[in-house]
Image (cartoon, helix red, strand yellow):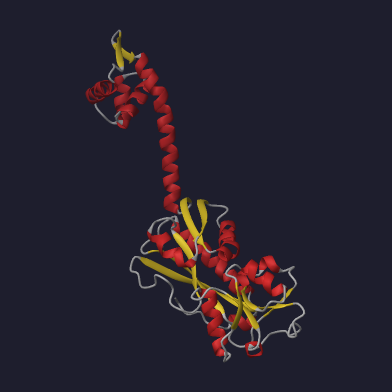
Amino acid sequence: MIDLRRLEILRELDRCGTIAATAAVVHLTPSAVSQQLAALSREAGTPMLEPDGRRVRLTAAAELLLRHAHEVFTHLEHAESDLAAFRRGDAGTVRLGAFPTAIRGVAVPVIAQLADSRLDLRISEVQPENAVDALLGRQVDIALTLTGGAELLGADDPRLADEYLLDDIMDVALPRDHRLAGLEEIDLREMVDEDWITHAPGVPCWTAMRAACARAGFVPRSRHHADDFTGAVALVAAGQGVCLLPRLAQGPFTSDPIVILPVSGEPPMRRIAAQFRAGTHDQPHIAPVLEALRAVARAHAASAPAALRRRIPITL
């Protein structure tokens, strides 16, 4: 392995022309410079210097090595620049995992927030039930995850930490010709006799729906199951029932033949959090992404109707 310090001395000799001048630049004695260049010759397996009267000059092998050295030192300059940017939080790769609606509603706006930085933000779809494994397996650095009311998965794991971001309010989606479609808001007690499009038991949306219906005094009558919101909305539009639709998921369905109404009183919601490995939150490349997530969450909260903003978030 060629020693970079010795390679730098060779580069300075090529620039300065003499051992004495080189020694002054690299802050060594002329004897020490000669010893370093002799050691470089041994590392390279061929002489770096040859006599030139009372002076020395570079051999052809040394000139060949210097052509590579210039590229090496250029790369080192770039590396130092990148490391400085990394220390400032302006560079580095951050892998963000998110469930599908959070990719659209949170992760994509975060990309825009970080557009002027040199951070390389990479998004992967990760369902909430897989977030813990993805973090501990180092497939992602931050995971957007959620709960419908129960404790966040991994909340009691000392290897992980989490930070509350926002409440994703869930509204009622009705067929356009539904008897209640003309209301401004809906009381879930009016939904007792409706057929419901429900999610798989245990997932956050199912938990939030069951809790909201329980507060209204009934258990929803499930007619169809659809974990994907595209399928659920299609079933609602076909008159097959009603469903709860989170606001982060509503964007693609503005032209569908359905009506979306807010729930009166305490609205059902999904609680969205950022989860990450314990101790990583203040790393130079992680911290800016978390701050961008907070900014996007604040923007969502600010855009909510005043009646819904009065709820004080509870830290997860």
Residue 282 visible (yes or no): no
Q: Residue shown at 45%/64% (left/top)?
A: 130
| Residue 43, image quadrant | top left
Q: Relative to 17, is 274 on the left or the right?
A: right
What is the number of callouts on the image? 0
The quadrant the N terminus occupies is top left
| Residue 261, image quadrant | bottom right
Q: Relative to 177, is 265 on the left or the right?
A: left
Residue 44 visible (yes or no): yes
Q: Nearer the viewer, residue 258 or 15?
A: 258
Q: Quick one: which residue is furthest to the front in this view?
A: 223
Give percent across and percent down for residue 50: 30, 12
Give percent across and percent down for residue 114: 55, 56
| Residue 295, image quadrant | bottom right
The quadrant the C terminus occupies is bottom left
Q: Residue shown at 64%/73% (left/top)?
A: 303
Give percent across and percent down for residue 26: 31, 30
Q: Residue shown at 34%/14% (left/top)?
A: 59
Q: Relative to 80, is 313 on the left or the right?
A: right
Give percent across and percent down for residue 39: 24, 24
Q: Relative to 177, is 13 on the left or the right?
A: left
> Above or below — where is 129 with respect to 118?
below
Q: Nearer the viewer, residue 265 or 125?
A: 125
